[in-house]
Amino acid sequence: SNQAGNWNDPAIWDISGTPATVPSTTPTAEYDVVIEHAVEIPSSMGAAEAKSITCPDGTLGEVQLRQNNTLTVTEDISLRKSDNGMIIYNQNGSFPTVIFGGTYRTGKKTTIVKRLLDDKWTLVSSGLDI
């Protein structure tokens, strides 16, 4: 990314390296994506894809995934930012999905934001040792 903005906005991406089989102005499953700014996958975009995602040390790189979306990364996700490398939101609609085929690394945490409705609630927890 060369600036903050939406994943589906060609203006925030610089394309370099080996050309994709099917060239695109936004990331596809053929691209290694480097994010140095806050990039949002907006509500109801549907699907976002990448070969890999890296947010380098010392940048403001952050992935914000909104409801009704799926992010598919065929290899690794490496978020080196010390706080909030990925923020997953669900204010209303379907909870977003992250699918990755490699390793998920984060500097400190991934944040999940879910609006509670009436008597419904969601619990997100690490595994339990019993």
Image (tube, rainbow, N blue to C red):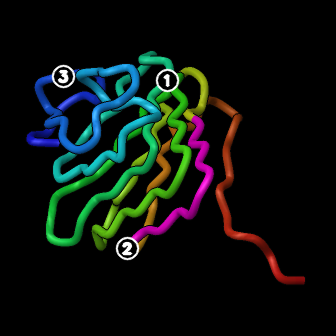
Q: Which residue is mark 3?
A: 10
Residue 38 among those drawn in magenta: no
Of circles 3 and 2, the one toward us is 3
Q: Which residues are magenta?
A: 97-107
Q: Quadrant of the C terminus?
A: bottom right
Amino acid under label 2?
Answer: Gly
Amino acid under label 1?
Answer: Ala
Of circles 1 and 2, the one toward us is 1
Dot placed on the residue nearer the N-terminal end, 1 or 2: 1
Q: Is residue 69 left or right of residue 41?
A: right
Q: Which residue is mark 1?
A: 47
Vertical side of 127 occupied by 111: above or below = above
Q: Which residue is mark 2?
A: 107
Task: Give the crowd class for mark 1: few <14, some 14-19, many >=20 residues within 10 Å.
Answer: some
Contact (Cβ within 8 Å) of mark 1 with mark 2: no
Q: How many marks?
A: 3
Please name the residue shown 34% across and 60% down the image: 84
Residue lying furthest right: 130
Task: Give the crowd class for mark 3: few <14, some 14-19, many >=20 residues within 10 Å.
Answer: some
The residues bearing labels 1 and 2 have C-alpha atoms spaced at a distance of 25 Å
Local secondary structure at mark 1: strand
The residues bearing labels 1 and 3 have C-alpha atoms spaced at a distance of 16 Å
Q: Is residue 95 left or right of residue 77?
A: right
Local secondary structure at mark 2: loop
Local secondary structure at mark 3: helix
Of circles 1 and 3, the one toward us is 3
